[in-house]
Image: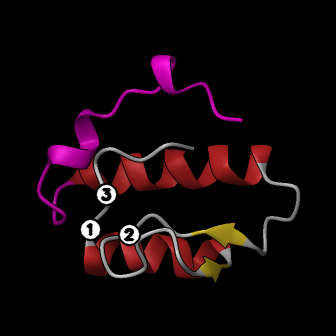
Amino acid sequence: MIDQENMDRKWMFASRLSKEYEDGVKEFRRCAVEHAKNPNRIICPCFKCCHSRVVNTDELEEHFVCNGIDKVIHV
């Protein structure tokens, strides 16, 4: 499980076009892969999937950029 208390979430509130958001997505992806039982099956917390779809890491990054992320995620 990812340590939510130590994860900086400022990037989630930044513009999806900003470097801050891009860097945050990459860091989230890195943490997700590090803590996943199977990095090709990660529950997607984007607004469109709403934790109801399993994606691979490439899809996860694409969904965050295109759809945004649920800012109250529990990972």
- Residues at badges 2 and 1 in contact (C-beta under 8 Å)? yes
Residue 27 image point, x, y percent: 52, 45
Residue 73 image point, x, y percent: 41, 47
- Disc 2 from disc 1: Cα separation: 6 Å
Give the residue furthest to the right. Answer: 37
Amino acid type at image mark 3:
Asp
Q: Identify the disc placed on residue 6.
A: none
Q: Secondary structure at mark 2?
A: loop
**Residue in the image at 38% along x and 69% along y:** 46
Q: Is residue 7 magenta?
A: yes
- Disc 2 from disc 3: Cα separation: 6 Å
Question: What residue sits right under mark 3 in the picture?
Answer: 70
Question: What residue sits right under mark 1 in the picture?
Answer: 68
Left-right relation of 2 to 4: right
- Considering only order in the chain, which callout, 3 or 2, is on the residue closer to the N terminus? 2
Q: Secondary structure at mark 1?
A: loop
Residue 17 sits above or below residue 9 on the image: below
Give, as a single range, the part of the protein colored magenta.
1-18
Q: From the image, state whether disc 3 or disc 1 is nearer to you.
A: 3
Question: What residue sits right under mark 2 in the picture?
Answer: 46
**Residue in the image at 77% along x and 45% along y:** 34
Q: Secondary structure at mark 3?
A: loop
Q: Quadrant of residue 38?
A: bottom right
Give the residue furthest to the top. Answer: 6
- Residues at badges 2 and 3 in contact (C-beta under 8 Å)? yes
Residue 66 image point, x, y percent: 28, 81
